[in-house]
Image: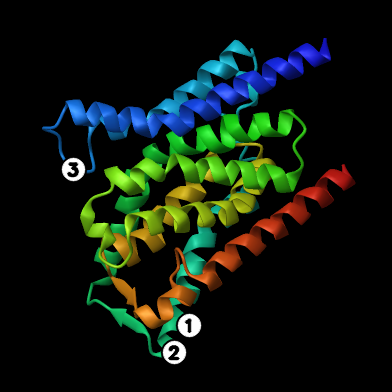
Amino acid sequence: MNEKVSKRDKMMLAVFIFVTITAGSFGYFVDQLLTEQPEGNSLGMGLWLVLPFFTGIVLQIINKDLNRIGIRPNFKNNLKWYAIAVMVFPCIALVSVILAKISGGLIVREIKLNALFGLVITAFFANFIKNIFEEFAWRGYLFLNLEKIGMNDWYLYLTNGLIWGMWHITYYMFFLPDEYFTKISRPMMVIVGIVLMIFWTPMFVEIRRLTNSVWSCVILHSMEDAVPTMLFVTANVFQIEERYSIMLDPISGIVPTAFVFFIGLGLRRCRAKREQNS
């Protein structure tokens, strides 16, 4: 019986991974048929975003296991983990700003404090809905079922991050407007994106484990979109000179990426210690 359940679990996981990896191609094909669409906001891009989410939800319903996907926020006794989810990326962005300022590589665009705050708040809520679809796919269905088939932490991090990154390939190659590729090519963005998501995955997975909720990951992801991405990419409030960006860029720099990775490992130790004590 267990063997049959295990085979079914693996088959359903394979279905999810197949849909995830092909969702972008399907969306791109739709956009080739419907050419009169706004750039960066097409029907194909919408399909690419929601297909993994809805596939995961349907598969969990078939498995009669939807309650374990992480829908409950579980704020009680988890506020410190939610606080970490809120503060990690703003703190990393602040470290990047300080180090870039000390090294003389920081460029600051003039902007009023209230306008800066407004940008962050607007970006957070604008991305919150989008991140529900992402996080309930990767840290909802995918994480849960990689863990269910008995994958150890390191393979789980690698697989979760790799599939998350591969899902972005069509986004970087076709959906994202050309204005994002003045300093980096689309193929290089694919490589950098996949590597980043693999290194970010331990933190996302462990926040999900510690809170037993995907909402902590939705908040974590939305803060990444609202602070470093908005301030350094979308609005260009801060810029780091190219000679320093490989080390200090708050999204893709080596130093911030290392911070994110080691924060993830620290959270893993906290979770393991809690499990041992219980």
* Marking on residue 17: none
Q: Which residue is mark 2?
A: 103
Q: Which residue is mark 3?
A: 39
Q: Which residue is mark 1?
A: 99
| CA–CA distance in space, label 2 to label 3 | 37 Å
Pointers 2 and 1 in contact (CB under 8 A)?
yes
Query: Which quarter shows the N terminus?
Result: top right
The quadrant where residue 263 appears? bottom right
Foreground mark, 1 or 3? 3
Label 3 is placed on what type of residue? Glu
Q: Picture coordinates of residue 26 (x, y %)?
A: 34, 27
Instruction: Reply above or below: 83 against 155.
Output: below
- The front one of 188 and 265 is 188
Q: Residue at x 51, y 27 (%)?
A: 18
| CA–CA distance in space, label 1 to label 3 | 36 Å
Label 1 is placed on what type of residue? Leu
Whichever of labels 1 and 3 marks the residue nearer the N terminus, that label is: 3
Q: Picture coordinates of residue 24 (x, y %)?
A: 37, 34
Label 2 is placed on what type of residue? Ser
Residue 27 in view of the camera: yes
